[in-house]
Image (cartoon, helix red, strand yellow):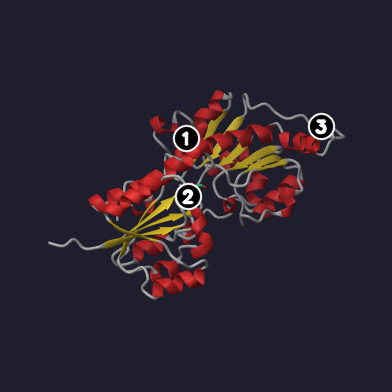
């Protein structure tokens, strides 16, 4: 009996887990697109270049070639495609709804867990850095002005402050433990209230209460505008939400830029409503709102939440593991929650 020859498509690059990737060769042929832009990629799809591809691995950076994996791309992908393994926690670039609507559906996985520590570490760095408003002094120092003239305003200690976490998934829960080690009191809001065991005893509050009582507000929820357009989280923090916050609140975001209306954040910073912000993600990466760049009270990191050798390696291995398990058992290891019942 001859075994059917399958193909596995790589969208983006493998930077660390080369052995794990090559080992997928035991299942079939490993292929890559030649395209360097979306139009050419769609053409390759329509020309049947990826016929027989059963599983695809994609990186966040592969959007520079394919663009968003929206309805157009989903419908152009080969009919043989059954599994799409995204190498990252946030899969806002993939229209999961369109993937589910195909017949048979494309099953999508992401990388939970492996990203939690590194992202929560950066989150904590941004909380401390923004509370202490370190950017102002650090910027002056590099300009040869020591702390600057006038000296930066005094910062604030994390001890005793209320940290409000919006989105209590793996990263939010990891952050909670870290923040408590710094003496912060953690409250949270989430689509669903968690069990005490999962929440670690953090108090569940309404969205409005989270906004009105947090000294530091941390955004740890997914951006889902492609997948859930009717219940999307885009701009969940905008002008009206800033108005409900405490004066002098600190805002930190390691989730996705577009969960905050950046223009409204700039206004709230300029008005002094927001004392400082710590941001790892931006609405239109790599572009950054000029109002954020010019404001010394904003600590800016260029999307480096998982930027460590250990975490990047673990993420690649996890995503490749999803393909391996799916090819062996017909089921992904970590399907995205929207497809849990598929
Ligand atoms: O931004 C990083 C990720 O989604 O894993």
Which is more toward the observer, 147 or 143? Answer: 143
Residue occupying the far right of the picture: 149
Q: Earlier in the sequence, mark 2 or mark 1?
A: 2
In the rendered image, which quarter is residue 101 located in? bottom left
Q: Is residue 162 left or right of residue 112?
A: right
The residue identified by callout 2 is 90
Q: Earlier in the sequence, mark 3 or mark 1?
A: 3
Q: CA distance from mark 3 to mark 2?
A: 38 Å
Residue 115: image location, x then y, percent = 47, 40
Q: Residue at x 48, y 30 (%)?
A: 202
Q: Secondary structure at mark 1?
A: helix
The residue identified by callout 1 is 173
Q: CA distance from mark 2 to mark 1?
A: 16 Å
Residue 5: image location, x then y, percent = 24, 63
141 lies above or below 66:
above
11 lies above or below 216:
below
Which is more toward the observer, 190 or 105? Answer: 105
Residue occupying the far left of the picture: 1
Q: Nearer the viewer, mark 3 or mark 2?
A: 3
Whether pointer 3 and pointer 2 mark residues with C-beta atoms closer than 8 Å, the reply is no
For label 1, count other residues whose C-alpha is less than 10 Å away and answer few (under 14), some (14-19) or many (20+): many
* Dot 2 beta carbon under 8 Å from ligand 1: yes
Q: Residue at x 28, y 65 (%)?
A: 104
Q: Which mark is residue 246?
A: none
């Amino acid at each position: 009996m001859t075994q059917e020859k399958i193909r596995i498509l790589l969208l983006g690059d493998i930077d660390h887990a080369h052995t794990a990737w090559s080992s997928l060769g035991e299942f079939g042929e490993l292929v890559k697109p030649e395209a360097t832009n979306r139009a050419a990629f769609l053409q390759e799809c329509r020309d049947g270049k990826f016929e027989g591809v059963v599983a695809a691995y994609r990186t966040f950076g592969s959007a520079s070639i394919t663009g968003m994996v929206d309805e157009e791309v989903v419908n152009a992908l080969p009919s043989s495609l059954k599994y799409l393994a995204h190498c990252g926690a946030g899969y806002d670039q993939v229209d999961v709804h369109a993937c589910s609507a195909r017949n048979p559906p494309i099953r999508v996985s992401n990388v939970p867990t492996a990203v939690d520590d590194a992202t929560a570490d950066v989150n904590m760095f941004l909380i401390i850095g923004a509370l202490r408003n370190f950017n102002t002094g650090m910027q002056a120092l590099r300009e040869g002005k020591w702390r600057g003239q006038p000296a930066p305003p005094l910062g604030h200690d994390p001890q005793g402050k209320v940290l409000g976490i919006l989105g209590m998934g793996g990263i939010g829960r990891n952050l909670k433990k870290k923040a408590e080690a710094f003496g912060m009191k953690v409250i949270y809001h989430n689509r669903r209230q968690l069990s005490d065991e999962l929440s670690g005893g953090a108090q569940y509050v309404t969205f409005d209460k989270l906004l009105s009582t947090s000294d530091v507000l941390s955004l740890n929820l997914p951006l889902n505008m492609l997948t859930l357009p009717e219940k999307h989280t885009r701009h969940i923090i905008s002008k009206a939400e800033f108005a409900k916050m405490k004066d002098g609140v600190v805002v930190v975001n390691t989730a996705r830029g577009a969960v905050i209306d950046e223009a409204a954040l700039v206004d709230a910073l300029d008005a002094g409503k927001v004392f400082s912000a710590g941001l790892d993600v931006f609405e239109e990466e790599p572009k950054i709102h000029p109002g954020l760049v010019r404001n010394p009270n904003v600590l800016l990191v260029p999307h480096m939440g998982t930027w460590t050798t250990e975490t990047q390696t673990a993420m690649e291995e996890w995503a490749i593991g999803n393909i391996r398990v799916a090819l062996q058992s017909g089921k992904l290891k970590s399907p995205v929650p929207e497809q849990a019942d598929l």
